Image (tube, grey):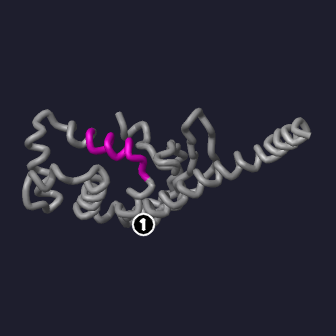
Amino acid sequence: MKKIFILLCLCGAVALSPLLAKSEASSVQEVAKRYLAATKLYKPKEMVKYMHSEALKQFRSLIMNSMPDKEKVIQELTQTFALKSKEEFKQLSDSQFYVKYNEAIIKQNPQMAELMHRATFTILGVNKEGGLRHVQYRTDLSINGQKESEVNTFSFKKDANVWRALLRSRISQ
């Protein structure tokens, strides 16, 4: 009887495995859809919800290391973020840093938000690579009457058992 039970469990696992794989892909795809929707609206407070903690830490590091003089970077970003002091800047979490930085970008370049609002994002597929999931998507945009289309890939990794976006490779370099 015990052997039959084990056999039934194994058969059930084999039968359900395609459904589980599809469910996982849908989960990653759902997170990607939400992230891209927040990107389209250029809402940094929404976008950050779908970012992996490693990506947020890496993003901050990239910005902080963009110039040799870190104190100058801190001084400039403290002003740009409309913070009261360097100490307040240093207390920002990686998530808060990401939000403040992206809000500053839009404030300085509102056309970028308009451009993002006009973009359409279409998810093309999800590929699995170890603990990563790569989501291919197409961005369609019309700039000055000229239609542009580009295929990109976002990678996702679990963060506290939830799929979250990593930085795109050309950003992280």
Report the side of 102 relative to 170 (left or right).
Answer: left
Give amino acid for label 1: Leu
Report the side of 106 relative to 75 (left or right).
Answer: right
Report the side of 66 relative to 138 (left or right).
Answer: left
Q: Could you tell me what secondary structure mostly forms the magenta stretch?
A: helix
- Residue under the point 53% across and 51% down: 149
Disc 1 secondary structure class: loop
Quarter of the image with the C terminus in it: top left
* Magenta highlight range: 51-61
Can see residue 10?
yes
Please give the residue where the numbered disc 1 appears in the rendered image: 41
State yes or no: residue 57 in magenta: yes
Question: Dot 1: within a 10 Å radius of its alpha carbon, few (fewer than 14), some, or many (20 or more) residues?
Answer: some
Work out whether residue 87 or residue 125 is closer to the camera in this orientation and state it: 87
Q: Position of residue 136 (x, y in %)?
A: 58, 46
Q: Position of residue 116 (x, y in %)?
A: 42, 61
- Residue under the point 33% across and 40% down: 58
* Residue 69 found in image quarter: top left
- Residue under the point 64% across and 47% down: 125
- Residue under the point 13% across and 56% down: 88
Q: Is residue 83 above or below residue 166?
A: below
State yes or no: residue 97 in magenta: no
Quarter of the image with the N terminus in it: top right
Q: Is residue 51 above or below residue 115?
A: above
Can see residue 144?
no
Q: How many marks?
A: 1
